[in-house]
Amino acid sequence: MIRCVRANKATFRPVRFQPGFNVVLADKTNKSSRKDSRNGAGKSLLVEIIHFCLGGSAGTSLKKKELHDWRFTLDLQLGGRELSVTRGLHHPSKVEVAGDASFVAKDLLLPLPGGSLQIKSTEWARALGSVVFGLPREEKPQPFTPRFRNLFPFFARSGRDAFASPFRHHRQTKLGEQQICNAFLLGLGWDYARQWQLLREKETLLKVYKRASEAGVAQLESGSLGELEAERVRLEQAAHRSEENLRVFKVHPEYERIEQQASELTRRIHELTNQNVTDGRLLEHYRRSMAGETGAADSEHTGRMLEETYEEAGVVLPDLVKKRLDDVKQFHRALVQGRRDFLASEAERLERNMAGRKQDLTGLDEQRAALMRVLETHGALAEYNRLQALRQNAQEKLAQVRRRIQQLKELEEGRSQLKIEFETLRQTTRRDLDDRATAKEQAISLFNANSEALYDAPGNLILEVGKNGYQFEVEIQRTGATGIENMKVFCYDLTLAQLWTSQPHQPGLLLHDSPMFDGVDERQKAAAWTRAKAESERLGFQYICMVNTDDIPEGEVMQGLDLRDESLVRAVLTDQPDGCLLGMRF
């Protein structure tokens, strides 16, 4: 129950409420002209302030820069506790609470000078859910569960869109939220409504997968299950081979050093082999040169031929010439012999070097063979790590393909499975609704009585389970009546207020802004206010209505109810600056 609405500015006009029936009037003054309107008096702004102090977001009117330093306060009675809550527009994330805040966990409250406490606005809304509607105090509530800020607007609708349908307080409210909130407020199995929403989320996900697949965006490819299975088999074999390679792999701690030694031996073997090839070619050259030398015998033969030639020519050789010819022969013999001795010694040296290298090559080759046997039976740590990386890569690819196969199976089988789940949930929800016949009949009975108080024939509150879960509908047969949709909302809201008065946790409040009665026949408006007054006083909840004075019917239509009675009127707001709620216009 709301005791008072206040602000930190002197121009603000505090509004104090009482238990039972409360009226806030919007009137014109003698100074008003045809251009003046009651729309700026502050009725809807008062509703916005109440929501703001109870954890809601700041509405359009509160976001104006002229109000940036304003702080609003609600004096409340919650569950028998008296407290005041203050929230400023400059720091909307923080709420100040004074009074009995024992329903709030102590670790959420920060003491402030003067004895008040500070709490985050989100935590404040969660605490209100526990004391007003008995919601569990979970630090992180599960998705698709009733929350205070989703439930309270049914008891204080704000904005014209809130009156479009009895079962939602905003045009953008999704089907799941409607079903969960209304099932909770009517005492039905709201958890089944939550399960319906979870199935719808799964259905949406499957549709997204299908669209992504058709567009070629997702990895899931329609009709490729066989290909993926073949790829899975291939990857399983590759993974098995990598596992086997690792199993038989032996790591030698000095593999790299041995590998370097083997490489060095190979280099030396190649070097010695190349040297033998070079020396072999030189040896062959020397042997050919030795075979080509004429020797000393050849020189004697040449000398005799020369002497015979001179004799045939009739020339007698003097002794001096003969002496010199003998010297030449002697020199030639010495020269030839010296060359033959040099070639022989060089050939012997080459043969000796080549033989030594062959012996070295045999030893080096044996050493290299021993090292290669080690390298053939063992591996390096780097090679082992590479094999491990290959195995990991194969396993990751295999896991990815398996996930894709599973996802594709879910995509292909999801629709049929989802149909089964929907049908099972539909049957379960129907049985639960039958089990809750008492709560269902009580809500229907109250709605019928409320609608019958406004019209000749009672209306119907229809609660059933359809193909999409809970179905809520209201019917009021009144041909030709205006504003009947608004009165459906009125009857439903009043039904909720009546139902919750018997609960240990309850809002204890029902608030209707003036748009509720726009376009409604005078007799129905009068009947609605009369019904709200009687029920709020009978059941002990607080009813607050915002009314324009020119919307009040006159005479017998009001059935003796005077909305201008000072005992009912909590504030009279006007279209003038000093008469509006804020005490100023901008």
Image: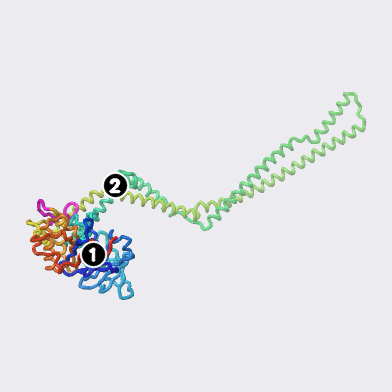
Q: Which residues are magenta?
A: 461-481
570 w.r.t. 260: above or below: below
Q: Secondary structure at mark 1?
A: loop
Classify the position of the C terminus by image quarter: bottom left
Position of residue 343 relative to residue 202, above or below, is above
Q: Nearer the viewer, residue 81 or 550?
A: 550
- Dominant SS type (magenta): strand
Q: Nearer the viewer, residue 418 or 535?
A: 535
User: As displayed, is residue 248 above or below residue 131?
Assistant: above
In the image, what residue occupies the spot 28% across and 69% down?
Answer: 10
Q: Residues within 10 Å of mark 2 (few under 14, many from 20)?
A: some
Nearer to me, 335 or 87: 87
- The answer to whether residue 468 is magenta is yes
Residue 52: mark in rendering = none
Write down the residue under mark 1: 579
N-terminal-most mark, 1 or 2: 2
Nearer to the camera, 34 or 16: 34
Rendered location of residue 390, percent (x, y): 43, 51
Q: Are marks 1 and 2 in contact (CB under 8 Å)?
A: no
- Residue type, numbered disc 2: Lys
Whole-percent x, y for residue 474 in the image = 14, 55
| Residue 202 shown in magenta | no
Residue marked by disc 2: 210
Quadrant (top left/top right/bottom left/bottom right) for the N terminus: bottom left
Q: CA distance from mark 1 to mark 2?
A: 61 Å
Colour convention: rainbow
Q: Nearer the viewer, mark 1 or mark 2?
A: 1
Taking the spot 37% from the left edge, 47% from the top edge, the residue there is 234
Question: What's under tag 1, amino acid-wise?
Answer: Gly
**Which residue is the extreme one toward the bottom?**
114
In the rendered image, residue 28, in percent from the top left (x then y), is placed at 20, 61
